[in-house]
Image (tube, helix red, strand yellow):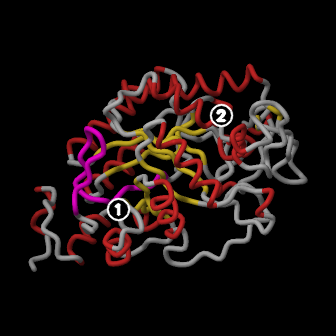
Amino acid sequence: MDGLFSPLTIKSISLKNRIAVSPMCQYSSTDGFANDWHLVHLGSRAVGGAGLVFTEATAVSPEGRITPDDLGIWKDEHIPFLKRIVDFIHQHQAVAGIQLAHAGRKASKSAPWLGNKHLSPEERGWEEVYAPSPVPLAADIPPPVALTLAGIEKVISDFRDAAQRALAAGFKVIEIHAAHGYLLHEFLSPLTNHRTDNYGGSFENRIRLLLEVVQTVKTVWPADLPLIVRVSATDWVTDVENSWTVPQSVDLARHLKALAVDLIDCSSGGNVSVQQITPGPGYQTPFAQAIREGARILTGAVGLITSAHQADHIIRTGQADMVFIAREFLRDPYFGLTAATELRQPVTWPVQYERAKPRT
């Protein structure tokens, strides 16, 4: 198996390496607009040697934001500054990707440094948050409103319209966020989906909304550009009979592959407070391997991947096809260049930084 710095071609897009900057919420927008913070944050990771750079979770509707400060793509006015960021990323030999998201019942909260608390309309929150079923996120939070069929149709069209705007902004990769307890994950898991219509109950019904979102995005997203889905491979609860599990994720990946989804970004958890996780280095990598082998689809590994040799080992041993790195890129925006030095890989540095390139 090739290593971390081997190129990867997905449809018409060639990535110079297997390193992706994972979507990381910045909670630094006003009315969904990107700004200089996002330009510097994302642009520096492109300069820093990543092959694929993702925006944070980008809301497809105002009510789909986690916080009032989330990045958005629900109106055309959001496109110009996003395009400026995309152009900069592409100028530095990285590929720009966008993660499209709807927060579901986890919407209308404050940023983590403001307490991560539920916000009322008087506190810049919104009147109603939506979910498959009126299952409250916590005892002290009002229950969400169960989406009607008309509401589900709006969610589907919001994802489609967001994908069309992403294309206009120049993004080359879309990732649909179906993980971490946000809306699409809420539909997948029986812990949060208690519906009795065609969107609840059986496995086929619970995955229906995600498949319909993928299908409608594909009506506007070019067939030669990559489409990725992020999943939580497991809910991490002991009641496996009534939760979302790795075998179901493998089965879902097979369905997504049949719809020409190119890669599954394999995370986990985030749906319920009773989850039991013992994190450690690469603790989610086995999920990427299970889905890769079970569904015969490309996968990305994520979660406490912090070193060049660890990331390289994941790729070389066939556990995943890419590594999605988050916190390590916050600590070191130039992780891609750092990793190349550690692994003694010949990569091109920005000419402005060439004088600092280590000589091996």
Q: Position of residue 335 (x, y in %)?
A: 32, 66
Q: Secondary structure at mark 1?
A: loop
* The C terminus - image quarter: bottom left
Q: Which residue is mark 2?
A: 209
* Image quadrant where residue 321 sits: bottom left
Q: Nearer the viewer, residue 49 or 148?
A: 148
Q: Is residue 137 left or right of residue 234?
A: right
- The mark nearer the N terminus, 2 or 1, is 2
Which residue is at 26% across, 71% downward? 338
Q: Amino acid at mark 1?
A: Pro
Q: Is 151 a magenta residue? A: no
Q: Position of residue 69 (x, y in %)?
A: 59, 41
For residue 135, above or below residue 247: above
- Let me know if residue 107 appears in the view: no
Q: Nearer the viewer, residue 31 or 281?
A: 281
Q: Nearer the viewer, residue 351 or 360?
A: 360
* Image quadrant where residue 200 sits: top right
Q: Is 17 a magenta residue? A: yes
Q: Secondary structure at mark 2?
A: helix
Which residue is at 85% across, 45% downward? 135
Residue reaching furthest right? 139
Give the magenta-colored segment's residue range. Answer: 6-23
Disc marking residue 333? 1
- Let me know if residue 256 appears in the view: yes
Q: Position of residue 209 (x, y in %)?
A: 65, 34
Between disc 2 and disc 1, the foreground one is: 2
Q: Is residue 274 left or right of residue 344?
A: right
Q: Position of residue 231 (x, y in %)?
A: 57, 51
Which residue is at 89% across, 52% downward? 140
Crowd around label 2: few <14 · some 14–19 · many ≥20 (10 Å): many
Q: Amino acid at mark 2?
A: Leu
* Image quadrant where residue 314 sits: bottom left
